[in-house]
Amino acid sequence: MRIAIDAYGSDNAPFPEVEGAIIAITEDLCEKIYLVGKEEELKKELSKYFYDEKRIEIVPATEIISMDDKPATIVKKKKDSSLVKSILLHKEGIVDGVVSAGNTGAVMAASLFTYGRIKNVLRPAIAITLPTQKNPEIILDVGANVDCNEDNLLQFAILGSLYSRFFYKNENPKVALLNIGEESSKGNDLSKAAYKKLSEFKDINFVGNIEGKAMLKGNVDVVVCDGFVGNVVLKTVEGVAYSIFSMMKEQFKKDWIAKLGALLSYPVFSYLKKKLDHSEHGGALLIGLNGSTIVAHGSSDAKAIKNAVRVSVKIAKSGFIQHAKEYFEEL
């Protein structure tokens, strides 16, 4: 397996991307990594490490996508950017997947314009893996489509179900619709129309509505919503996790008894931190496209980049993209 990394996507680029590539190669997650970006800077950074030089190749790119760049124009205006050149490597069959910690809108736009949508897929989506009390849970969309109709949500359910089947090996994944209540009569017009569509579609295991408070229990495998709701949920979960750990740290600093309790409870807190850490899950898949792009968090460190490579390799090996193509072509 060969993976391309946009070496100038993260907030601290290219340091996490380079170190993450080194770790991925050291752990034999893939055969070869293509680091795309400013050649001299990448050579200088790589020179700090001891690694198999045959397994990491630099692909020169002179431009970088910034937060100010309009996603719809980057493919034409910044053809020599690290992001666009990474995606082109996949389009041309040189690599099996792409990893970028860049601007999500730009990564989606570049991937969409380069790969194109899978035939009969109305809109691509962003699918993330949410840690739960039980098994990992796929939620989509989390930001690509702010406004959706019931047909979009049905297709998200199909894509999420296929993703769960081939990536997580769930034979009959449970699919739920995120709503304000469990009853079919609850929600706005979109929720009610989507509920009807999902319940009538026999190719997915639709188990009904799920409320926000039940999402982290892990009783379902796929949660479907529009991009507006999904993005709010994702950022709320991230914020709550961060706030809880911050408040706990403050309490532990108050007196020696609290510090002793913190010391004794360290294994539990360590487990929770790992469970809720976004860097452990590798990033989000841009789903519904004729290619595989993983979007990592902008604040990704080397471990997050390494795990994004791991996910990219696993997606390529699972055959999910091809299975999704075959399914939608038959519709």
Image (cartoon, grey):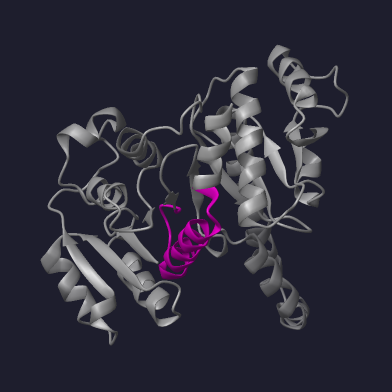
Relative horizontal placement of residue 289, taking residue 180 as reference (left or right): left
Q: Is residue 23 above or below residue 297?
A: below
Q: Is residue 307 magenta?
A: yes
Question: Quadrant location of residue 46?
Answer: bottom left
Q: What is the magenta segment's predominant secondary structure?
A: helix
Percent position (x, y) of residue 202? 77, 30
Quarter assignment of residue 134 = bottom right
Q: Residue furthest front?
A: 330
Residue 36 drawn at (x, y percent): 23, 59
Q: Nearer the viewer, residue 305 or 312?
A: 312
In this view, the residue in front, 55 or 307, is 55
The residue drawn where x is 49% and y is 27% is 123
Task: Name, please, the residue furthest toward the bottom.
Answer: 50
Any magenta on residue 270?
no
Q: Residue at x 77, y 83 (%)?
A: 264
Looking at the rendering, in which quadrant would you find the N terminus?
Answer: bottom left
Q: Which residues are magenta?
A: 296-321
User: Residue sitting at 46 percent across and 34 percent down?
Assistant: 118
Q: Against 152, is 9 above or below?
A: below
Looking at the image, which residue sits at the far right? 183
> What is the number of callouts on the image?
0
What x and y, as percent, mark residue 181? 84, 27
Image quarter of residue 97: bottom left
Q: Nearer the viewer, residue 307 or 264?
A: 307
Q: Specify whether residue 296 is in view.
A: yes
Name the quarter where the C terminus is drawn.
top right
Q: Is residue 205 above or below residue 305?
A: above
Where does residue 311 sit, x and y in percent of width and height?
51, 60
Q: Residue at x 75, y 83 (%)?
A: 260
| 122 up-or-down from 100: above or below | above
